[in-house]
Structure formats: C-alpha cells, structure tokens
Image (tube, rainbow, N blue to C red):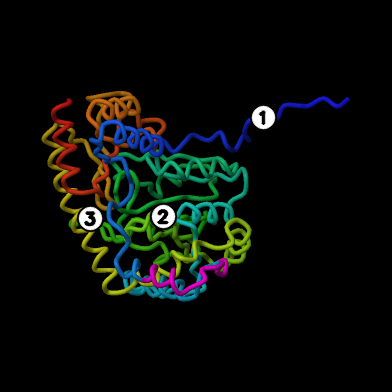
Amino acid sequence: MSRSVARPSESVRATIPPFHVMDVWAAAGERQRTHGDLINLSAGQPSTPAPRPVRTAAAAALEGDVLGYTVALGIPELRAGIAAHYGHVHGLAVDPAEVVLTTGSSGGFLLAFLSAFDAGDRVAMARPGYPCYRNILTALGCEVVELPCGPATRHQPTVAMLEELDDVDGLVVASPANPTGTVLPPEELAALAGYCEGRGIQLISDEIYHGISYPGAPATSCAWATSREAIVVNSFSKYFSMTGWRLGWLLVPERLRRAVDRLTGNFTICPPALSQRAAVAAFTPEGYAEADGHVARYAANRALLLDGLAALGIDRLAPADGAFYVYADVAHLTDDSMAWTYRLLAETGVALAPGVDFDPVDGRRWVRFSFAGATEDVTGALERLGSWQ
C-alpha cells in the first residue's frame, strides 16, 4: 500500500513579504463599510478616470471589435503611438519595434527581470524604494543589494555608491520615485546609465511617473537619452490615470527583444486587447490636455499637504519633486509605522502607507501620504490628523 506524503503548503519563492499597502487598502475598505468615513491617502493611484478620448475609443471597440488576442508584443498602432510619444515629450527617436506592450508596469518588471537576470544575479536598488522590485527579484532567485539612500543624495542612488559595491549584474532606478517623489537630474541619470553600460550592468529605469512633476524640480529625462542598453519601464497607469486598465510598456534593447517576446507570449499571450485599442487615443491633444489638468490638481494638493504637515510639526520630508507622494519622517510620533498607520485608520478613518513597505530597515519611522485624490480629502486628512496627534 502506498503512503501519501504531505506536500508543503507553498513554494519557497512564494514566501516573499506581502505588498503591505494592499493590506492597508483591504483594511481601509472595511473601515468604509463599517463607518463610511474613510479618507484614503494610502492609494498610489489617481482618483480620476481615463481621459475621455480613451473612454470613447473603448466604447467604440466594445461595440465594433471582436477583441480577441493581439500579437504578443502589442498592436502596431499603439506601439507606433508610444514611439511618437518619446519624440513629443523627450525629443527621442524611438522605433515602434523597440516598444513592447505589457500587462501593466508590474508585468513589465517581471519581463524585464526574467529576460535580463538569472537566479543568483545581484541587482541593486535604492532603499527606500518600491517594494515590488525587491520582492519580484527575490522570488526569481536574485540577490537584492539595497543602497541606503537618504537626504544627502535626495534619496537616490549614485555612481559613487555603485563603485563601492562588489560586482553587481543590475541596477533598478526610479525617477520620479515611489515613495519619495524625488527626480534624478538628467546629468545624474546619464551618469548612472553610462556607468552601467560601460561595465555591463543591466539598468532598469522605472519611468512610470513621467509627466507628473512640479515647478522647481529637476527635469525628467529618459534613460534612453544616454544608453539604449537600458530597459525602460513605463505605464498608462499614472499620468494617463489608467491604473485598472493594466497596460504598460517597455523600451527593450535589441539583444533582449526576442527573449521578451518568448516570455510574454508564454506568460500572458498578450496585454488586454480592449486597453490596447483604447490607449491609442491617449496620445491626442485632448488626452494630453486632460492628463495635464490632473497634474495641476496634484500640484495644488501637494502644496496644501506640504504646508499642512509642516504646521503639524511633520516637517522632515523627502523633496516630492514628482509623482503624487509625500514621504514623511514621523520618528517623533512612532517607531512602528505599521502599527501607527493601523491605529490612525482605526481611530480617525485616515489611511496612510507604512514606511516599512518601502524600507524594511528604517521605514518603521516613515509613512507615505498620497495626494492623488480629491483636494477635500487632503484637507480632511490634515484636520483629522491635527485633532488626533
């Protein structure tokens, strides 16, 4: 008689930490259900719909198209539109063949990491930084090398930091960055890109917040302005306010293009067809104008939040050059940002993102505020926080 053997409940690769802000969102949803008073400043997404031309195109596609599978790399019209977007925004010539559509930027990171790195490769990233870089790389068997980045370097990595490391195979940078909102000045991004190309280090440049920056910030630049060996990640989610449409893109060096094609064809077959058909209309004058209108609102919210936090004594802040976040040092209030944010939610109905999501070492004394929502949400959150402190 054969004897059954119990299998482990999960794979080793699945034991990565959760994306904690998603747990906060779940708790926030429960707070709204039970109390109806939620103010959610934890969400890293716009509170506005996709631009009207995109929604109009989506409605037409629903009525007139079959919406079956597309080619794995994306429909030609959208790849051409994205290539032209780089000429419009950055003055860069990009061939549509260099553009790969992905299932959100999350799918883009997975394709980029799988195509460029093997298990055991060492990949550097800033700390604080977007947790999914760290967690995806870890799940794929890579060694994550965290670069502690504080106010002295505006929370961004530098060439000097790379020079101090033993050999690394990759570097992930983000500009504007999540959670800090800081922008790498063009000359610093160029220095990093040039250093990586010269030493065979694969640069992954997260540019999903391009288009969202504020007066006085450094200019945002594309890594491809310096090195066509970098992989550039971008998305329709942030600037074009299309998070749930799950559509992003990569700019891919020729040497990796076939690898990305093989991977995406096996993993997802293609990105969502409806989103692709509709997104072509984002690159119209009306689409850009609507997106820029949202950025103007973010700018007003940012000013309100920066002033309001300073008035509350929360004044040790990352520069917030771009994106729609304020990353705040709250060490004078707590040394456990996870517990503090849950207590704040339970007692006031205000949801924030705990810093430990972005920095597992020092994030216990930081929190992230999002100002992507309505202006009255920012005002209401400041009022409740002031009464609660």
The residues bearing labels 3 and 1 have C-alpha atoms spaced at a distance of: 50 Å
Asked if residue 195 is among those painted magenta in the image, a careful observer would answer no
Image check: 285 left or right of 309?
right
Report the span colored magenta.
57-72
Numbered disc 2: secondary structure:
strand
Q: Amino acid at mark 1?
A: Pro
Residue 8 is labelled as 1
Q: Are marks 3 and 1 in contact (CB under 8 Å)?
A: no
The residue to which callout 3 is attached is 217
In the rendered image, residue 247, in percent from the top left (x then y), is placed at 44, 60
- In the rendered image, which quarter is residue 342 located in? top left
Given the current orientation, which residue lies at the most extreme right position? 1
Which quadrant is home to the N terminus? top right
- Is 47 displayed left or right of 125 in the figure? left
Q: Nearer the viewer, residue 188 or 234?
A: 234
Give the camera-side residue of 69 and 251: 69
* Label 3–label 2 contact, CB within 8 A: no
The verdict on residue 70 being magenta is yes
Q: Is residue 54 left or right of residue 146?
A: left
Whether residue 186 can be seen here:
no
